[in-house]
Image (spheres, rainbow, N blue to C red):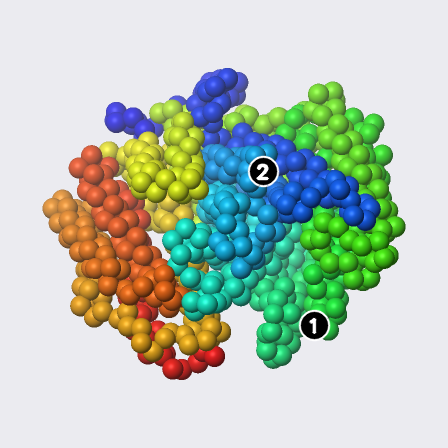
């Protein structure tokens, strides 16, 4: 933002056309190479979806290589090493590079339009997340091209992926590449949560939100809780491989099962993370195609919240054969069956909606029927696998592979194809041609069922998963050949779908607005939508899936709503109270910038330095990333108080820099929640090893050092207390931040002494765990010092005042969290030491 004195008034344009020209001049993303600086959610969302579809095509080719290999016995098509890489990368691409990024892209594209906002809460973070996703995914695919791709399965079980059994860099590519990609997922989760909770149209309370927003809110919360355990596991395994800290080595107090627990704490909720956005699309599409309202709106909201809670109690569902106690097995088996209830509620609500309406048998509805058939079948086999005796028989066979594909393809791909045919007219401004739509659907549907129904049979006949060849006398060859033929039929079907969608984009019939006669706000925008979505923002007085876009759209385009004008060249949108939807304040969003791209490139350099073992470059790249993030901030600051701003409709609101708990504050809260989940997983891992590993911790091991621990605790507590006294007042703020800076520096020094005192971190997992916790505390204290310096810089630059304390509020959250986490972490070795001789095996 310019340092010039901003004007708080506004001037209503003389005509709607002039208004749109003014908005386009400010919100537009430019042309040619300028598009690389785009941060607009429409551009970023489309980039996510297109890139995900490219990865889907690559994953599909790999699937056909697998089916070609298994079509006959003793095939020489791929050798064991090649097959391991192809098999692993197929799973990695479909789970990490296609499914999750595609629905992220759809949500990024749709949510502001559905909620009546002009963009997401943090457009630059979405752009940064996209570039991280693109670079991380390309990193993994390039490894496959050069023959160094991961080869331990998409789940990377230890000890197979540990250094003794995977001495090359194949496993490192997975660990670092997936961690890089997960940055994108977590940034998208925070972005989506804050946008849904705060950037809605005035009047849109939580219970007036479109149902798709409810689904995405729950999914984003699940991502915040579900992804950190995987990130932690990847970090710990990479640290073991690179620096020999034995978290998973049973000969030195580790346990390979710790990896399985951390992975499936992410892995099983991920199935529902993938399914729920598709279910949200169905809950949006089905009522429109049936010309009625969604039945059971409140029940569906309760069901998806219940499904989210239950999904985190199911991770042992994948570990029935590892020796879990029978009582625990019974608990997880019951929970696995119980999750069918909220799923059933949604299915019956959709069926009731169809029964009460007048279904239009269009192409999207055809894919909806495909979903019902395939997903319900997959759900039934899932209930079978939830039963421990059956799971023991079918575990690690093709039956499990078939179940997984019925659930994921039925629960995600068919709904997303329905969504593509439903929303592509909005994205492109053209209606479907549909010459190829029906044949494409039937080829996919028939080919899929031939492929994976047969795999149920090969699984029941004992064919294990992940084998690249099998003996002729096993009797599986005919079934595998039929399955492979079905796979190629399905591939032809997907190729026709792609061709059909290209025909729609290039040759579809143009239309003006809302071809489906829908009731959600995205259809009130012009199609294709402009970069700013709405000429003015609406006030919502009913449930936001029963609106009249054809009537509302022209009113908003004419500027007869909120913010129907331009002010100071600002990119403005509104926020509301989280629950009631009452108007809260104005958010001024940042302009297009290349900073997200450069920050992502630097982040890629950080991960590349780790992969290449250029550890001297790693801290340089890390510092560069921090500096680049701080360079984002001047564009969002104010150097003077503005007071209430006119927003139209006779109302006023404050600038987001002058309010308590604006979107940035909530973003930090959610980021710290994800951070706390990772920390909890780390402490959980240590206590799991205490319970499962023998002689843990060893009685002769002492890593408790009172003096540095006390100094660090006092320093962290002082920093947190000083942060609370920084309130934007002259003198007091500088003193408080200076004290916080000094206290964090002292804490970092004390933690460094503690780290050097821990005996033999490579000798036993107990020492390694204490070392890891201390590193976590020291890193957070160091970041706290950086935030204190940043606060002083912002004060000195004039961005902080009595009414402009957002930077201080965010710093205070970090100082408080670091103090609490630090006290727990510094007490951790003493607690662990006290458990010597108790528990273990």
In the rendered image, residue 827, in percent from the top left (x then y), is placed at 29, 70
Task: List x then y, in percent, for residue 24.
Answer: 49, 21
Residue bearing the label numbered 2: 147
Query: Residue 259: percent from the left, percent from the top?
Result: 51, 61
**Residue 27 versus residue 154 in the image, above or below:** above
10 w.r.t. 151: above or below: above
Which of the 4 image quadrants contains residue 333?
bottom right
Residue at point 85% right, 51% down? 477
Decide if residue 281 is on the left or right side of residue 698: right
Label 1 vs label 2: CA separation?
Answer: 39 Å
Quarter of the rendering occupied by the N terminus: top left
Tell which circle, 1 or 2, labels the residue nearer the N-terminal end.
2
**Relative vertical location of residue 795 with respect to residue 206 in this rendering, above or below:** above
Taking the spot 74% from the left edge, 65% from the top edge, the residue there is 394
Badge 2 marks a residue whose secondary structure is loop
Residue at x 71%, y 68% (from the top left corner): 391
Residue in the picture at 85% in, 57% down = 473
Residue 354 horizontal side relative to residue 303, left or right: right
Quadrant position of residue 511:
top right
Residue behind mark 1: 388
Q: Is residue 810 visible?
A: yes
Label 1: how many Cα within 10 Å (few below 14, some 14–19, many 20+) = many
Label 1: which secondary element: helix
Q: Position of residue 194 (x, y in %)?
A: 46, 47
- Residue 362 visible? The answer is no
Q: Is residue 624 left or right of residue 312?
A: left
Front one among 733 and 336: 336
């Amino acid at each position: 933002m310019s340092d010039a004195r901003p004007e708080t008034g506004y001037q209503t344009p003389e005509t709607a056309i002039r208004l749109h020209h003014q908005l386009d001049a400010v919100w537009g993303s430019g042309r040619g190479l300028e598009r690389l600086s785009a941060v607009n959610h429409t551009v970023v969302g489309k980039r996510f979806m297109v890139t995900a579809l490219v990865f889907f095509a690559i994953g599909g080719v790999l699937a056909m290589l697998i089916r070609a290999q298994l079509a006959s016995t003793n095939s020489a098509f791929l050798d064991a090493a090649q097959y391991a890489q192809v098999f692993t990368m197929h799973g990695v691409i479909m789970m990490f590079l296609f499914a999750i990024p595609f629905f992220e892209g759809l949500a990024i594209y749709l949510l502001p339009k559905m909620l009546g906002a002009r963009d997401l809460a943090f457009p630059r973070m979405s752009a940064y997340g996209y570039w991280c996703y693109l670079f991380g995914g390309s990193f993994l695919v390039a490894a496959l091209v050069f023959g160094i791709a991961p080869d331990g399965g998409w789940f990377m079980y230890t000890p197979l992926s540990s250094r003794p059994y995977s001495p090359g860099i194949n496993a490192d590519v997975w660990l670092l590449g997936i961690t890089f990609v997960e940055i994108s997922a977590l940034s998208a989760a925070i972005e989506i949560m804050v946008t849904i909770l705060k950037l809605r149209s005035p009047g849109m309370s939580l219970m007036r939100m479109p149902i798709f927003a409810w689904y995405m809110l729950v999914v984003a919360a699940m991502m915040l809780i579900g992804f950190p355990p995987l990130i932690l596991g990847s970090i710990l395994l990479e640290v073991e491989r690179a620096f020999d800290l034995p978290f998973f080595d049973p000969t030195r107090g580790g346990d390979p099962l710790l990896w399985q627990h951390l992975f499936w704490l992410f892995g099983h909720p991920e199935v529902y993370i993938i399914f729920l956005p598709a279910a949200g699309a169905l809950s949006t599409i089905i009522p429109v195609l049936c010309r009625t309202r969604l039945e059971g709106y409140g029940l569906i909201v309760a069901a998806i919240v219940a499904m989210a809670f239950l999904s985190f109690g199911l991770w042992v569902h994948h570990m029935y054969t590892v020796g879990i106690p029978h009582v625990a097995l019974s608990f997880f088996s019951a929970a696995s069956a119980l999750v069918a209830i909220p799923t059933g509620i949604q299915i019956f609500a959709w069926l009731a909606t169809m029964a009460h309406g007048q279904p239009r048998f269009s192409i999207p509805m055809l894919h909806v029927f495909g979903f019902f058939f395939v997903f319900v079948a997959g759900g039934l086999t899932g209930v079978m696998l939830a039963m421990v005796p059956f799971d023991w028989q079918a575990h690690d066979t093709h039956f499990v592979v078939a179940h997984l594909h019925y659930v994921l393809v039925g629960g995600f791909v068919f709904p997303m194809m329905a969504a593509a045919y439903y929303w592509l007219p909005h994205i492109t401004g053209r209606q479907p041609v549909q010459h190829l739509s029906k044949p494409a659907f039937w080829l996919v549907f028939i080919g899929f069922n031939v492929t994976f129904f047969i795999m149920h049979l090969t699984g029941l006949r004992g064919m294990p998963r992940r084998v690249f060849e099998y003996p002729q006398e096993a009797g599986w060859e005919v079934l595998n050949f039929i399955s492979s033929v079905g796979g190629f039929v399905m591939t032809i079907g997907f190729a026709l779908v792609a061709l059909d969608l290209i025909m729609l984009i290039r040759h579809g019939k143009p239309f003006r607005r809302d071809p489906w006669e829908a009731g959600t706000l995205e259809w009130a925008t012009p199609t294709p939508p402009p970069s700013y979505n709405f000429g003015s923002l609406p006030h919502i007085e009913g449930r936001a899936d029963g609106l009249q876009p054809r009537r509302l759209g022209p009113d908003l385009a004419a500027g007869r709503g909120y913010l129907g004008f331009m002010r100071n060249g600002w990119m403005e949108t509104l926020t509301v109270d989280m629950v009631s939807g009452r108007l809260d304040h104005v958010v001024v969003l940042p302009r297009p910038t290349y900073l997200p791209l450069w920050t992502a490139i630097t982040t890629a350099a950080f991960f590349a330095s780790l992969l290449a073992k250029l550890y001297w470059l790693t801290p340089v790249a890390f510092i560069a990333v921090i500096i680049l993030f701080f360079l984002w901030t001047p564009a969002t600051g104010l150097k003077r108080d503005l007071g209430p701003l006119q927003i139209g409709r006779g109302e006023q609101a404050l600038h987001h820099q002058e309010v308590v708990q604006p979107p940035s504050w909530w973003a930090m809260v959610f980021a710290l929640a994800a951070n706390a989940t990772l920390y909890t997983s780390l402490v959980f891992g240590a206590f799991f090893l205490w319970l499962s590993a023998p002689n843990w911790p060893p009685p002769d091991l002492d890593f408790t050092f009172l003096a540095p621990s006390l100094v660090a605790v006092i320093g962290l507590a002082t920093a947190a207390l000083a942060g609370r006294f920084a309130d934007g007042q002259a003198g007091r703020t500088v003193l408080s931040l200076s004290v916080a800076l000094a206290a964090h520096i002292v804490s970092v020094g004390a933690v460094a002494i503690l780290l050097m005192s821990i005996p033999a971190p490579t000798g036993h997992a107990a020492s390694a765990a204490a070392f890891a916790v201390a590193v976590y505390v020291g890193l957070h204290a160091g970041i706290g010092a950086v935030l204190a310096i940043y606060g002083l810089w912002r004060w000195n630059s004039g961005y902080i005042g009595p009414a402009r304390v957002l930077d201080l509020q965010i710093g205070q959250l970090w100082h408080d969290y670091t103090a609490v986490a630090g006290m727990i972490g510094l007490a951790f070795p003493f607690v662990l030491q006290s458990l010597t001789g108790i528990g273990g095996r």
